[in-house]
Amino acid sequence: MAVPGVSRATIAQLQNEAGACETVQQIIDVAVTAEALAVAALGRAIEIAQSGALAMNDEQIQVLQANRVAEQAHYQLLIGAGAQPLTTTFTIPDPMIVSDVPTFLTTLIGLEEAFIAAYMAAAQIFAIRGQSDLVRLAVQIGAVEADHRAHARFYAVEAGVIDGVPNNLAYEKALFSTVTEAAEALQALGWIGGDGPEISYPGPGEIINPGVIYLEP
């Protein structure tokens, strides 16, 4: 089956260049780092929301708890596969991210879009390498990150922070051609090695599961 916009010559070139792709180890090391960041940052956001300093209601906090459980499941799976985090200490680029709801929601949307794009890049590289089991896993995780994005957009639309609808894309945006680019983006945004307040995996508070199932692929 032909894919629109992708010629046979392009496919052949990609196959020939497979040896130049990132290794599986490089990919899962970046992925587990991103998952560690998500678990830690969500822990901080939940803690502050429960204290009343981040104005989110009980339903919204429960959704964040569910997100955190999923990210922790991803982290544990990757660790079990031999992933080694590049770091487990992160920095919050702007204190308003965990004190101002519009800033928090727009930041969360942006992070989820980066995570989705990173797993898309991973899936592409795994496909070039002919590792269909890893393609499936990347798609499984990326699809959940897309759920998180839609929820964040729902609350942002509801609060008047953004316009449109939560599920506003027919295709996710391919922001990166390699997974390493995603790590570089996190660093450039100040989440890794920045000047803001530090948070370390797994972050504050117990990881509470409000009803997330299928915790293993």
Image (cartoon, rainbow, N blue to C red):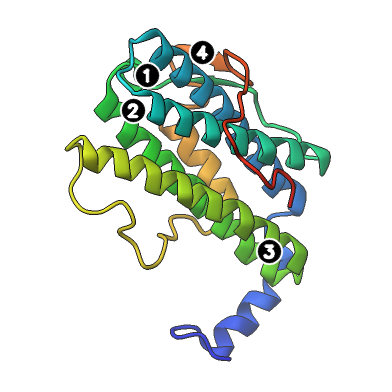
**Badge 2 element:** helix
Marks 4 and 3 sit apart, C-alpha to C-alpha, by: 33 Å
> Which residue bears the numbered disc 3?
135
> Which residue bears the numbered disc 4?
198
Q: Residue 29 or 169: which is nearer the viewer?
A: 169
**Badge 4 element:** strand
Residue placed at 54% from the left, 15% from the top?
199
Looking at the image, residue 197 lies above or below residue 101: above
Q: Amino acid at mark 3?
A: Val
Task: For residue 178, say whether it is visible.
Answer: no
Looking at the image, residue 6 lies above or below residue 99: below
The disc at residue 98 is 1
Looking at the image, residue 68 lies above or below residue 201: below
Task: For residue 83, say whether it is visible.
Answer: yes
Marks 3 and 1 sit apart, C-alpha to C-alpha, by: 34 Å
Mark 2 crowdedness (10 Å alpha carbons): few <14, some 14-19, many ≥20: many
Mark 1 crowdedness (10 Å alpha carbons): few <14, some 14-19, many ≥20: many
Q: Amino acid at mark 1?
A: Val
Q: Decide: marks 2, 1 in contact (CB < 8 A)?
A: yes
Marks 3 and 2 sit apart, C-alpha to C-alpha, by: 31 Å
**Badge 3 element:** helix
Q: Decide: marks 3, 1 in contact (CB < 8 A)?
A: no
**Badge 1 element:** helix
The disc at residue 104 is 2
